[in-house]
Amino acid sequence: QLILGIETSCDETAAAVIKNGTEILSNAVASQIESHKRFGGVVPEIASRHHVEQMTIVLEEALTQAGITYEDIDAIAVTEGPGLVGALLIGVNAAKAIAFAHNIPLVGVHHIAGHIYANRLVTELKFPSLSLVVSGGHTELVLMEAHGEFTVIGETRDDAAGEAYDKVARTLNLPYPGGPHIDRLAHEGTPGLNLPRAWLEGTYDFSFSGLKSAVINTLHNAEQRGEKIEPAVLAASFQESVIDVLVTKTLRAAKAYHVRQVMLAGGVAANKGLRAALSGAFEEFTDVELVIPPLYLCTDNAAMIGAAGSMLFQKGKRSSLALNGNPGLDIEQSFN
Ligand code: ATP
Ligand code: MG
Ligand code: FE
């Protein structure tokens, strides 16, 4: 079974070919980071325009690398949401055009289901499975009892983890996206500042806006006193606070739901500190298999969309040519 995956939800134009749901035959990604950098974040209109320019190039690259043509493909999997609506529409329309022209079934995929299924390109899923999703727009704990069945047991009440990283980075005048820069800085400093942790006891929810404000206030107050705070110390303290909450809550949920597997997913899964802390926390917890995807499968790509699409296609999901981009798509309802 060959699936063509297409992803254009934010600032990566991506296409990939996945064999039998688990094997990457090609994985082409055109990143727009350079174009958005000078604005300090993703500009939706610029993103859409780049997707239009890059889509056919990336599709051709994915097919060529895989050594196949459209006639060999069993289904097209495309991100239908969530994301920037103008960006989503480019991928959805490309997928519909190919599906119509070559008479290939179409499957709409939830972007976060894609991030989670990046792990299926690494290992088999074992249920119940718990995913810690940490990305630019999401921070949530997702429980799965079976393929394609997602239950969100906790989520952020304000900023996503990646968003907090990017905002703190901006305060430190680091380039966009700031996550990798904070990660690097954090390893050069020691976490000397006592920054808050929002535990939201009794829930698996998260909150990062208080921490973000604390970072900004700490910098501001020091400035007013004419003192200087080492960026590396600030980055290390911020990162320690984020990781402490993420790892503690994941461990608690894994025990409470008796899961057999914990998977890390989303762009912030590339964070070295988080990967190390999670590995450490689950080391003694031998009943649970911890899965951490390789870096190239953490940030946005189409291989993960192909992997999720393959599973959905096998379970019988078919989208019509009326498929639309849906920025508010709910992962729990995304099978239909
Ligand atoms: P979503 O998946 O929620 O729709 P998105 O697709 O924009 O959002 P991703 O591409 O999954 O987000 O992840 C991008 C985010 O990951 C950015 O906020 C970026 O700063 C963050 N990120 C990437 N690498 C690291 C890292 N090493 N440490 C921390 N954050 C990182
Ligand atoms: Mg991106
Ligand atoms: Fe993403």
Image: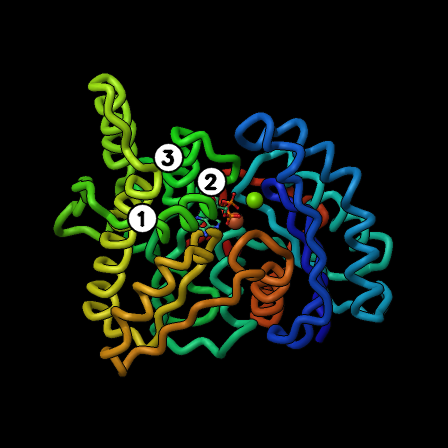
Amino acid type shown at disc 2? Gly
**Label 2 CB less than 8 angstroms from ligand 1:** yes
Q: In this rendering, would 88 be left or right of 127?
A: right
Q: Nearer the viewer, mark 1 or mark 3?
A: 1
| 126 shown above or below 16 | below
Q: Residues within 10 Å of mark 1 (few under 14, many from 20)?
A: some
Of pointers 2 and 3, the one earlier in the residue sequence: 3
> Looking at the image, do the residues carrying marks 2 and 3 touch, with CB atoms under 8 Å apart?
yes
Q: Position of residue 20 (x, y in %)?
A: 65, 77
| Image position, residue 256 (x, y; %) | 19, 68
**Badge number at residue 189:** 1
Judging depth in this view, the residue of 148 and 293 nearest the camera is: 293
In the rendered image, the residue lying farthest to the left is: 201
Task: Specify the label residue 178 is tagged with.
Answer: 2
- In depth, the one of 167 and 1 nearer the eye is 167
Q: Which of the marked residues, 2 or 1, is nearer the chain's N terminus?
A: 2
Q: Dot 2: what SS?
A: loop
